[in-house]
Image (cartoon, rainbow, N blue to C red):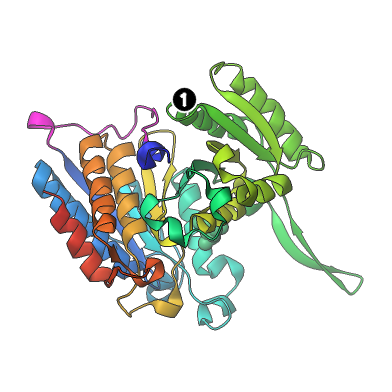
């Protein structure tokens, strides 16, 4: 199995939001938290606990400001995202998020107009903060290999891929409307990309590939879509600047198949917004532990929003059984990508590994012979492990 931390290498970032270090590299961090909906508040509380312990051990100071977004914001303010939340997030050094949204069949939020639903808040915040690069590592943990739904011969010696999803363009941000023509209802969604949008995400993908296993699989639907044909051309232009990185193109339907047939072939998967949304869910399920998978959404500087790859799990909210590890590992990504605190991020990741080795599991990753713990206990164990 490859090094499980291989997904976590730093990528170069621009000059904005460079944090100034005080004496001996001690930092004062101003983090905006969006606990959100469902299990969000529970898992964010545990991530704060682990961050606080890390800050204490390494001599940093963290100040948190909680803001509303998604369903919680609808309930309190009537809209899923307020200007106040956007401005507060913009003023922060980084944003840590739990999850947003509810049960789409039963929650009253889903009776509202589409642009007033919880998800519209998240899309709006991504756009407002220009978070165009979404990094979603999908790693098979040695300790959790039993949870992987694939056959042993397919798992082989494990896999470790990074999905680089374009996050502020494509279908999710194109013009859309519903109309009626001659008594026939019709809905239109528009998929648009310009070359600048493609180039900047491709550069991020190649940069991160340089720090990993130097392979980029660019995923598109170039046999049908114009946007994909442009995507391919621009990715090839960017690839010319990275002769050490092997580039391959793969059609999205084939990629969906290859992810369950031979996941170890992937290093960095570079793809547009909707394909990345779908493939990242598939990739995380293939690891068997979606409750473990972190994500980072970055702009052109070091600023980012960090959130677990999973959703708000309204069915288990408030029961104290959610797995906080994906959020805690997202906080580790924040330490690494936004603040260059590699030692601190390593410590958090090592704590996760060690606690899993000791046999502690939340219910979603429970297996025979292990000790079942709740969300809070998992947070306590991880915080105690950092010293
Ligand atoms: C994700 C989610 C969001 C998306 C939803 C909640 C809008 O599925 O982060 O993958 O599609 O981007
Ligand atoms: Mg998704």
Q: Main secondary structure of the magenta part?
A: loop
Tell me the quarter of the picture where residue 8 sits: top left
Q: Is residue 114 visible?
A: yes
- Based on the picture, tell me whether residue 16 belongs to the magenta stretch: yes
* Residue drawn 12% across the image and 36% down it: 26
Residues 294 and 202: in front is: 294
Task: Assign ligand 2 to one image quadrant.
Answer: bottom right
Q: Is residue 303 visible?
A: no
Position of 27 with respect to 304 (left or right) is left
Q: Position of residue 88 (x, y in %)?
A: 31, 53
Reading the image, the residue beneath label 1 is 210
Q: Is residue 347 above or below residue 319?
A: above
Q: How many marks?
A: 1
Residues 333 and 300: in front is: 333
Q: Secondary structure at mark 1?
A: helix
Position of 340 with respect to 187 (left or right) is left
Tell me the quarter of the picture where residue 232 sits: top right
Q: Is residue 274 above or below residue 312?
A: above
Tell me the quarter of the picture where residue 4 sits: top left
């Amino acid at each position: 199995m490859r090094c499980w931390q291989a997904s976590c290498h730093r990528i170069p970032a621009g000059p904005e939001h460079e944090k100034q270090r005080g004496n001996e590299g001690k930092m004062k961090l101003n983090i905006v938290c969006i606990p959100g909906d469902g299990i969000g508040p529970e898992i964010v509380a545990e991530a704060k606990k682990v961050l606080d312990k890390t800050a204490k051990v390494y001599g940093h100071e963290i100040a948190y400001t909680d803001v509303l977004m998604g369903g919680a914001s609808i309930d309190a303010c009537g809209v899923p995202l307020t200007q106040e939340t956007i401005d507060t997030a913009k003023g922060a050094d980084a944003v840590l998020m739990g999850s947003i949204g509810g049960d789409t069949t039963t929650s009253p939020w889903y009776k509202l107009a589409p642009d007033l639903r919880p998800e519209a808040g998240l899309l709006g915040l991504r756009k407002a903060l220009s978070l165009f690069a979404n990094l979603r590592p999908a790693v098979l943990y040695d300790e959790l290999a039993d949870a992987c739904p694939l056959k042993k011969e397919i798992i082989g010696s494990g896999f470790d891929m990074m999905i680089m999803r374009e996050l502020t363009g494509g279908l999710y941000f194109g013009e859309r409307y519903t109309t009626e023509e001659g008594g026939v209802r019709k809905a239109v969604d528009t998929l648009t990309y310009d070359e600048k949008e493609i180039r900047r995400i491709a550069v991020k993908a190649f940069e991160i590939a340089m720090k990993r296993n130097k392979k980029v699989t660019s995923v598109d639907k170039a046999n049908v879509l114009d946007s994909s044909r442009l995507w391919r051309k621009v990715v090839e232009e960017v690839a010319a600047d990275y002769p050490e990185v092997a580039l391959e193109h793969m059609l999205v339907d084939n990629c969906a198949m290859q992810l369950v047939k031979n996941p170890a072939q992937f290093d960095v998967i570079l793809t547009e917004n909707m394909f990345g949304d779908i493939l990242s869910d598939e990739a995380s399920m293939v690891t068997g532990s979606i409750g473990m998978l972190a994500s980072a959404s970055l702009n052109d500087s070091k600023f980012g929003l960090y959130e677990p790859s999973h959703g708000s799990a309204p069915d288990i909210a408030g029961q104290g059984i959610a797995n906080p590890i994906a959020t805690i590992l997202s906080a580790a990504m924040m330490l690494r990508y936004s603040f260059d605190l590699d030692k601190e991020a390593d410590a958090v990741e090592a704590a996760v590994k060690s606690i899993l080795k000791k046999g502690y599991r939340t219910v979603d990753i429970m297996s025979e012979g292990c000790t079942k713990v709740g969300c809070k206990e998992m947070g306590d164990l991880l915080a105690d492990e950092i010293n």
